Image: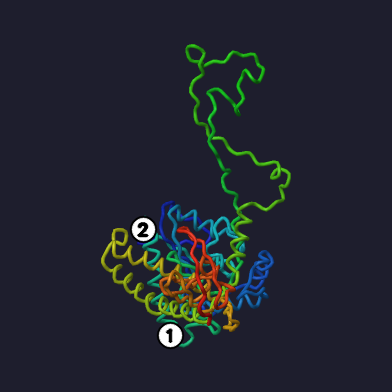
Amino acid sequence: MPDGPVLWGRPLTSRASGVYVVELAEPTPRAPIEMDRIGRWIERRPELKVDGARPTGRILLARLASLWLPAETILYVGATTGSVGGRVLAMAHHVLGDRRPHPDGQWLHTLVGIDRARVWWAETDATDEYLDAIFEAFGEGAAERASAPGGVIEGRPAGASFMPWANTRRQTGERQAHGITGAIAPDDREPAPPTHVVEVPSGDADGARLEERGTGTARRGLRPGGAPPPPRRVPVRERPSAARRATPSTPSTPARRDAAARAARIEAVPMTADALGRLEAELHELTQVRRPGVVARIKAAREHGDLKENAEYQAAREEQSFLEGRVRLLEERKRHAVVVEDVVTGRVALGSVVVVESDGETFTYSIVGTTDADPSAGRISTASPVGAALVGAVAGSEVEVRTPRGAARYRVVEVR
C-alpha cells in the first residue's frame, strides 16, 4: 500500500528502499513550462542540442511540450535501493543541467507550480520489479487514453513512448525518443587514486629504514640472531607524477575518456546499401515483432505472483534488457551510417564481391564494413586479415595473409 501524499520538496518519513510517484492533482491540457527556466538551462549547458542542432528556447520548449500527455496526472515514477526520502529530497533540490545530486526527473524543474505536485511512495525490496510494473500499467492506460481526440500534443516525436512525462528512460534500457542530447553535465568525478602493493620490511616508512635516516636509534623487532622479520605486504597509494603536479589545469582522465567516448559514438559508420537493408530489417524485427512478444510475456508472468521470486518474470525481463540494448546499438549505427556507392573500378573495395582461390579451393567473399561482417555467410570486413589484404587488389593479383596458423596465399580470380 502506498504512503503519502506529501507536497513536492517536503521531507518524506521513509528511509527504506522503495518506489515513488510524482503527480499533479488533476490533468492539464498543456505543459506549464516556464520559458525563463528553459533559457537558463540552455545557458548552463552549451552542449545541449535538439535533433543534433543547438536550439533556441522556443524550440526546446516545444519539444518538451510535445511529449506532454494531456489526460495524465503522473509526471514521474522512480525507485531507489537506498532511502526514498533522501532520493526525493535530492531530486527536489536538483538544478537543471547538473548531474548531481541526482539527474533523474530534471524536467520537473522546468514546470511552473511543481511545488504543488504530490509525492506517493511505497517501501519494497523488489524495486526494479515493481517499478517495471508501474511503467507497464501507466503505458497501457496512457496509450488507450491517447487514442481519444486531444490525447496527444501535435508535433509529438515519431517513436515516442508512453512514459510519465519527466521519465526519459526505463531501467530495462528503453529510452524516450525526445531527441535532446547534452542536457546534463558529463560525469567528471575523479576515480579513487590507484594503488599498488610493495614489499617493505616491518618498521619501514616509505621504504626508508630508521638506520638509513641517521637517527642512531637501534632497530627493534629483530629476530634472534639479528635477522629482520619477514617482509609484509603494504598497500601504498601512487603519487602523482611531476607532469601531473605541474599541470593542474589538464582535464581529468574521466573527462578525457568521456570526450573520447562521445567522439567515438559519432564517427561515421561506412556500410553498403545491402548492409543498411539488413540492419533495417533486423531493427524492424526487434521492434515490431520481438518487443511486443517480450512485453506480452512479462505481462503474463507478472500475473503469476510474487515478482521477486518469479523466475519466468525475471527471464522475460532479462530478455527485454538484451533486446533493448541491441535496438539501441542498431539505431546508433543507422543514425551514423554512410552508404558507400557501388563504383566499379576493378579493384577490391568496400562493397566489392571478390572470387579468390587458395590451395585449389575457390571462395567468394563480399567485402563489408566491420558492423556487417559474418564470415559464415561469406561477408568479411575490411578490418579482417583476409579483407585487409584483399583491399586494392585486382583480378590476377596474389596476396599473402598472415594468420595465427601461418601465412596463406590467395589469388584473386574475379572482382565485381
Left or right: 378 in relation to 94: left
> Do the residues under discs 2 and 1 have CB atoms within 8 angstroms?
no
- Residue that extends furthest to the left in the rendered view of this protein: 304
Q: Amino acid at mark 2?
A: Ala
Whether residue 24 is visible to the viewer of this picture, yes or no, is: no
Nearer to me, 272 or 118:
272
Whether residue 278 is visible to the viewer of this picture, yes or no, is: yes
The circle on residue 70 is: none
Circle 2 crowding by C-alpha within 10 Å: few under 14, some 14–19, many from 20 = some
- Residue that extends furthest to the top in the rendered view of this protein: 225
Write the residue at 54% across / 15% down.
Answer: 220
Residue identifier under label 1: 147
Image location of residue 198, percent across then percent down: 54, 33
Q: Amino acid at mark 1?
A: Ser
Circle 1 crowding by C-alpha within 10 Å: few under 14, some 14–19, many from 20 = few
Write the residue at 60% across / 22% down.
Answer: 209
Write the residue at 29% across / 71% down.
Answer: 300
Q: Is residue 12 above or below residue 75?
A: above
- Local secondary structure at mark 1: loop
Residue identifier under label 2: 126
Q: Is residue 186 above or below residue 218?
A: below
Image location of residue 266, percent across then percent down: 60, 69
Image location of residue 309, percent across then percent down: 29, 58
Nearer to me, 53 or 9:
53
